[in-house]
Image (cartoon, rainbow, N blue to C red):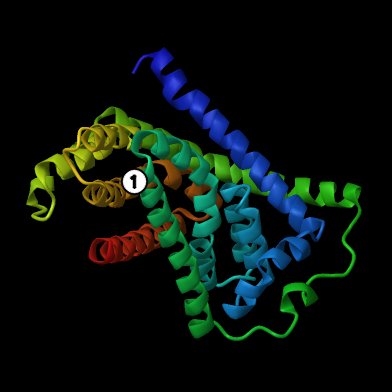
Amino acid sequence: MTFTAVLHSVVLPLGKLLLTLSISLLVANLIETLNWTRYLARFAKPLVRLGNMQDVVGASFSLAFFSGMAANTMLAEAHQQGRLSDRELILANLFNSLPTYFLHMPTMVLVAMPFLGSAGAVYVGLTLGAALLRSLLIVLAGRAVLPPQEEGCLECQLPEKGPTWREALHKSWRRFKKRIVKICLITAPIYAGMVALNSWGFFGAAERFMGEHMASVQWLSPKAASIVVFGMAAEFTAGLAAAGALLHAGDLPAKEIVLALLLGNLLSTPMRAFRHQFPYYAGIFRPALAMKLIVHNQAFRAASLVLVGLAYALLA
């Protein structure tokens, strides 16, 4: 790779990622030090109580509506301090899939609706339904496997009065300096490795391989399969463009187009999630734990999409 290519594909994006990570880490430390988790947790209080989850899980859930990275950083801090077990961390990370979805939903709506109209609304509604289902199931799972929390535990574990801004900034900066060096040392080589694999064509070859074997899906017509292939080989917008062309030409009914988009989403997202999430997840969590969280997240997401897709196919 030339110097210019390295600059634009590694140095600048990595610098932006590390800057965002740094800000998220500092904000999460500051929120916890100032004792604002008490107020953030109140927004998710009913669900968190029902799921026998701790105050930091509710705070992370609320914060995830604004920054998924800051929410994960808050969970990582609690896990490192021993306040969250591995099981609680996995459930909390999965629980945050709903607010994380809402972060991306406006873009999805603004892109899907012009291409597909009402069919786009159905597709967005189904993916939203899958996100809601995931959070509901995590609440039920937490109630089943986690011990009940004491009454008022979302607030009673935190002191009534937090430190002053000067004290909070000093403490947050001290904790930040300890973590950011480790995060940079882990994130930078992993990110560079991902860029190298991408430049060598690894991810593209994997996506093309999966796309070329779409013919084995018997229930999918060749035209609908083309939507899946375009979405996997290029990006989500390419799949939408192919779907829009077929829909407006009357070549495929809306139902088959929606199912093809769901299938493309199901098959393409795990690889892309690993490519984009693992570098910063490995910086926030331990690399092995980061991989574990991503695998759980993607498996659970895939299962929820299959459920809503089957329900739509049978009932629509």
Q: 201 left or right of 91?
A: left
State the residue at coordinates (64%, 64%).
78
Q: Secondary structure at mark 1?
A: helix
Residue 72, picture quadrant: bottom right
State the residue at coordinates (47%, 78%).
141
State the residue at coordinates (45%, 73%).
137
* Image quarter hosting the C terminus: bottom left
Total labels: the figure holds 1
Residue 151 position (above or below residue 216): below
Q: Nearer the viewer, residue 115 or 188?
A: 115
Residue 252 position (above or below residue 297): above
In the rendered image, which residue does mark 1 sit on?
119
Residue 35 position (above or below residue 87): above
State the residue at coordinates (55%, 51%).
284
Q: 18 left or right of 150?
A: left
Residue 286 locus on image (x, y percent)? 49, 55
Q: 174 left or right of 291?
A: right
* Image quarter hosting the N terminus: top left
Identify residue type, mark 1. Answer: Ala
Determine crowd level at label 1: few under 14, some 14-19, many 20+ residues with C-alpha closer than 10 A. Answer: many
Residue 159 locus on image (x, y percent)? 85, 70
Q: Nearer the viewer, residue 254 or 175?
A: 254
Residue 42, picture quadrant: bottom right
Residue 204 locus on image (x, y percent)? 24, 34
Residue 3 locus on image (x, y percent)? 41, 14
